[in-house]
Amino acid sequence: MSESAGLAEASESVGLASASASVESGPGARVSVGLAEASESAGLAGASASVGLGPGARASVGLGLGARVSVGLGPGVREKAWAWVELLRLPALFTVPGDAVAGAAAVGTRPNSRTLLAIGSSLCLYEAGMALNDWADRAEDAVDRPHRPLPSGRVHPAAALAAAGALTVAGLALAARAGRPSLAVAAPLAATVWAYDLTLKRTPAGAAAMATARGLDVLLGAAATAGTARSPDRLFGTASTGRAARGQDVLHGVTAACRTARHALPAALTLAAHTLAVTTVSRGETQGGSPVAPLAALATTGALAWRLSYGRPGAGRPADDAPTAPHSARVGAPRARPGRASGAAPSPGSSPNPMADTLRGALTLAYAATAAHPLFHAALNPSPQLTQRAVGGGIRAMIPLQATLAARAGSPVTAFLMAALAPAARKFARKVSVT
């Protein structure tokens, strides 16, 4: 412990010129204060103060002219934050928003504020699954992947479990905020995530459970976007009131939910099929496996790419059959012809659009290339390293797949914005593994 103070060129006034004081206590700890060019007034010009706390940590404050505040965090804090980034596999989050957006496009509705709530719910539930996955696999990872945050001791298992619980509650709360239909989808989604991580992962039903979770995520976006807007129906040409109005609202809500699920189901099944193939391959990412799983995933990728390129689901769907279209027809009134409803948007696939078709074709090729290239190498040599690359490629391929589904549903602008996430996902995946 040492203390020094030097005062020079002090005038008759109260001001101190070029004065400095420093205190040191222990290795790496330091407190210093410098006061310079002080005038007779109470102002301090060029004054600075800095505090050092342990190796690599410091904080400094400057008062007066050129005042500044800076804080430096020690390597311990940075390492802790990086451990949580690895635990939650943050680069994989780029693949999540597209589920809700693809679901919204599938029901012919533009993304709205409820879509954002669905995206937030999906992100929370996805990260809950990541934290819970490592908590459930901590004993296995201690042998196969000791560098992971939990077996290496960088994150405490109790903290990971608590984070999984908190994220699940947050995800369900956001879904409830978006409406009862979205909560009705989010609840089984959360249950599927927990069942997969805790029980089903090592069973034959594990891959199917993961595929179900991804499909439910698409339906979550569709249900939230369609919403539960109050129906402007009139019963027999007169305004409904009292119990009749409530009954009509319930009936309209049930009908809209069924239509939403029906129109979003093809997109949900497409992403579920891709997820099923990738999850099956992932079973050999720690110890390797046979080429059967990568070859089956290659076949699945090819089949999905062909269907996305040539199939046109939803063509000819009546405009008044959209999940969000108001049911204004009276009992006994003639049904409007497809595409003739006033102010109705054209149904997906009902009219050819060369630019949309070109975008869809390019996105389909991007999906096939992103998924197929590493799968081909894993089929030739199903080593753990190449299998992990195949799984990572399959996860990243979800972004162009989601964008293709949006373009195919008639939302080219949304598809383009979704596809723009792919370069960022690839860049961050080089720093943090998504598997």
Image (cartoon, rainbow, N blue to C red):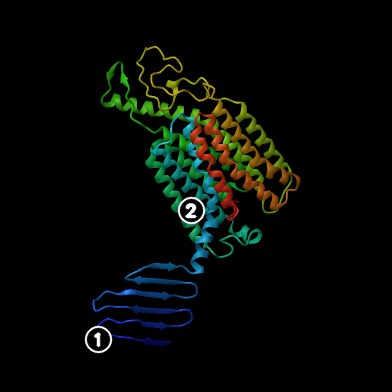
Q: Position of residue 110 (x, y in %)?
A: 43, 33
Give the alpha-carbon distance from disc 2 to disc 1, as whole Å.
Answer: 65 Å
**Mark before the other along the chain sequence, 2 or 1:** 1
Which amino acid does the dot numbered 1 rest on? Glu
- For label 1, the residue is 12
Up/down of 68 relative to 120, above or below = below
Q: Which mark is residue 343?
A: none
* Crowd band around label 2 with a 10 angstrom C-alpha radius: few (<14), some (14–19), many (20+): many
Residue 323 falls in image quadrant:
top left
Which amino acid does the dot numbered 2 rest on? Ala
- Mark 1 element type: loop
Relative to 124, is 390 on the left or the right?
Answer: right
Residue 376 vs residue 59, the one in the foreground:
59
Up/down of 142 relative to 90, above or below = below
**Residue 234 can be seen, yes or no:** yes
Q: Quadrant of the N terminus?
A: bottom left
